[in-house]
């Protein structure tokens, strides 16, 4: 799973990237290069599984995060399109960061406007790619009889419909599409149609204070657009991320924070992507895996290894909560809370799986 950080220039993208990845990406560089990092999805359930299995290896679920190098707004006045598309078009979701602190140059924040501006850029970028495709299709239609219906004319009609929708500032998901059309739309990878989380980037002084007018304005925008919003100070979070673990706790307490916002942000991203976690646990390895909500167990098996899907026989499934209350896997089996399932069983968040297979 990939997540792209987007935002107007100087909104705190790279600072947030550092906070999330606990890495050391340089800030204030205009090198035009994106940062890419892999982050572990925090999951407290892993602790018990590790304690119980004493494995040789522990592998958490991960998300790939990309800090886009696109410069949008500010003095640059560069438009999003080319840059942003190249860097982050293939992401599954966007973390959209908005400046809610006074800029180093003394400019007061205008987060509601900034969020709308960026959204508009995303839509414009999508419109541009719709137009490019339309031009290409029109060309291929030369010689096709007027009024004839071909896959190309069907795609053209769909693109025209999408164009109207985007121009009206609406979401493509408001269109009712056939499964074939949905597939086409998915292939277009529209930026404005990706699941999104908005981060209000506040100054360190505002932590624990009542919400500023600026943040309230952004909240109103998020509510009317049904986008989840988180409030944090990227700068403080990045400072926390750089400390050794034992000092992190002290620092958090001193700042009046309970947990790093990074945990909340990753959890929220996971939710917006519609992901759940299942586990495999044994002596060689305890591992957490991500899976789309609503997936059958044969897909979970395939996530682990294609052989497990191909040669799938049955899955032994016990939910983490039940296995933990029973005191362990064998105990859970005796208590009757581990069951055997066929391919089509829908995996639940927290399921522990043992796949029986033969290839
Ligand atoms: N006060 C305050 N300043 C911040 C915060 N987050 C970022 N900044 C400052 O804002 C400036 C821009 O931060 P960056 O993280 O480089 O922003 P960016 O969006 O990556 O910028 P570009 O990549 O140049 O578009 C830096 O001077 C940061 O120190 C914050 O939470 N509080
Ligand atoms: Mg940056």
Image: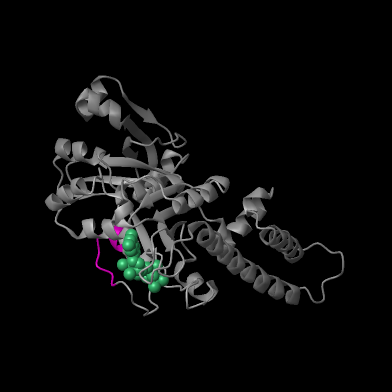
Q: In this view, does 307 lie to the left or right of 48?
A: right
| In magenta segment, residue 37 | no
Q: In which quarter of the image is residue 109?
A: bottom left
Is residue 36 at least partly visible in the picture? no
| In this picture, residue 185 sits left or right of residue 250 | right
Q: In this view, does 47 lie to the left or right of 32?
A: left
| Residue 88: percent from left, percent from top | 46, 66
Q: Which of 18 and 255 is in front in this view?
A: 255
| x 12%, y 50%: residue | 246
Q: Seen from this angle, which residue lies furthest right?
A: 146
Looking at the image, which residue is at 31% across and 30% down?
Answer: 318
- Relative placement, left or right, of 18 versus 228 is left
In the displayed structure, 244 sits above or below 314; it is below
Q: Residue furthest top?
A: 335
At 33% from the left edge and 39% from the top edge, which residue is drawn?
355
Q: In which quarter of the image is ligand 1?
A: bottom left
The verdict on residue 24 being magenta is yes
Residue 142 in the image: state x and y as whole percent. Answer: 80, 76
Residue 40 place in picture, x, y as percent:
28, 53
With respect to residue 164, does 331 lie above or below?
A: above
Q: Residue furthest bottom?
A: 31
Q: Quadrant of the N terminus?
A: bottom left
The residues colored magenta run 17-26
């Amino acid at each position: 799973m990939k997540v792209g950080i987007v935002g107007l220039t100087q909104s705190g993208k790279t600072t947030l990237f550092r906070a999330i990845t606990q890495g050391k990406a340089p800030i204030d560089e205009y090198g035009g290069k994106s940062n890419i990092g892999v982050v572990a999805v925090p999951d407290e359930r892993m602790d018990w599984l590790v304690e119980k299995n004493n494995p040789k290896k522990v592998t958490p679920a991960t998300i790939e995060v990309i800090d886009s190098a696109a410069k949008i707004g500010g003095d640059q006045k560069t438009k999003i399109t080319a840059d942003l598309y190249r860097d982050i078009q293939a992401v599954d979701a966007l973390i959209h960061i908005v400046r809610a602190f006074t800029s180093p140059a003394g400019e007061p924040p205008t987060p509601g406007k900034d969020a709308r501006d960026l959204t508009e850029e995303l839509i414009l970028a999508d419109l541009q790619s719709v137009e490019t495709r339309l031009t290409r299709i029109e060309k291929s239609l030369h010689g096709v009889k007027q009024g004839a219906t071909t896959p190309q004319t069907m795609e053209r009609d769909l693109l025209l419909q999408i164009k109207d929708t985007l121009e009206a500032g609406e979401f493509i998901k408001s269109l009712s599409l056939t499964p074939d059309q949905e597939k086409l739309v998915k292939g277009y990878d529209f930026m404005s149609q990706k699941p999104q989380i908005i981060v209000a980037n506040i100054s360190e002084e505002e932590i624990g204070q009542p919400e500023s007018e600026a943040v309230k304005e952004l909240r109103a925008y998020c509510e009317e657009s049904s986008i989840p919003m988180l409030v944090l100070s990227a700068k403080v979070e990045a400072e926390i991320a750089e400390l050794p673990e034992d000092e992190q706790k002290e620092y958090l307490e001193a700042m009046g924070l309970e947990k790093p916002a990074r945990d909340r942000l990753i959890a929220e991203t996971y939710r917006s992507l519609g992901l759940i976690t299942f586990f495999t646990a044994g002596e060689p390895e305890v591992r957490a895996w991500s899976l789309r909500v609503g997936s059958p167990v044969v897909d979970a098996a395939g996530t682990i290894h294609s052989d497990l899907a191909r040669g799938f026989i049955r899955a032994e499934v016990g939910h983490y909560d039940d296995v933990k209350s029973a005191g362990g896997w064998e105990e859970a089996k005796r208590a009757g809370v581990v069951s055997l399932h066929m391919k089509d069983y829908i995996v639940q968040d927290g399921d522990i799986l043992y796949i029986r297979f033969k290839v």
